[in-house]
Each structure stands twice: as structure tokens, then as C-alpha cells.
Amino acid sequence: MKNAYLITVHILNLLLLAGICFVSFFLVINITPPGPIPNFGFIEFSYVVFLFVMWGLNYWFQYKKRNWILPFAFTILFIVIALLALGVVVPLLRELVYS
């Protein structure tokens, strides 16, 4: 039973890490010509660092507590916070900083 929990935690966190790398790749790569606003600036870098820190804390807490509800609840919470930050916070900060 212990091995099944650890396998589940590792797989879920590898999927989250792959999602972070996917988002990071498309934040860095931009095919539009350069303009007055940088394609990858401090705000996007801060967002990627925030995702990695949140992922690390999530992974550490799941590994330490070893409770079956945590991997699923924290994975859903991680996705909700990441999408909220990407959809609301990052555009708001870009508007405040670059306008």
C-alpha cells in the first residue's frame, strides 16, 4: 500500500512538472516580432518561479504527510491557483507595469 501511494504521488507530480515546463516553454518562445513590451520579462519569470516553488512545497507536503486525499486535493488546488494566476494576476501585472 505504501508503494502504491508513492507511485501515485510521483506520477501526479511528474505530470504537474510537465505542465509547468509546457507553460514555461510557451512563455519563452514567441513568434511575434519584438515590440516595446518584452516577450519574456520579469513578470513571466516570477510566474514560472512561483509555479516551481508551489510545486516543490506541494510535492514535499504530499511526500511527508502520506495521506491519500492530499495528492488529488493538492493537484486540483495547484491547477486552480496556477490558472488563476495565469489568467488574472499576470495580465493585471502586465497592464500595471507596462502601461
Image (cartoon, rainbow, N blue to C red):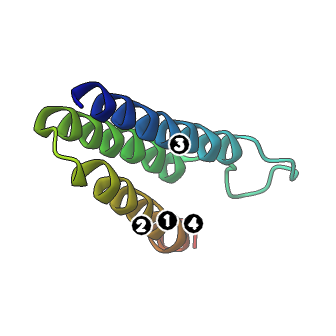
Q: Is residue 95 above or below residue 41?
A: below
* Residue that mark 3 sits on: 20
The mark found on residue 98 in the picture is: 4
The quarter of the image holding the C terminus is bottom right
- Tag 3 near tag 1, CB within 8 Å: no
Q: Amino acid at mark 1?
A: Leu
The residue sitting at 53% across, 50% down in the picture is 44
Mark nearer the N terminus (3 vs 1): 3
Mark 2, mark 4: which one is toward the viewer? 2
Work out how far the residue at label 2 is from the one at label 4, CA to CA, in angstroms.
26 Å
Label 1 to label 2: alpha-carbon separation: 5 Å
Q: Position of residue 50 (x, y in %)?
A: 37, 47
Number of marks drawn? 4
- Foreground: disc 4 or disc 1: 1
Residue highlighted by disc 1: 83
Q: Are marks 3 and 2 in contact (CB under 8 Å)?
A: no
Q: Indicate whether 77 appears above or below 12.
A: below
Q: Is residue 54 left or right of residue 98?
A: left
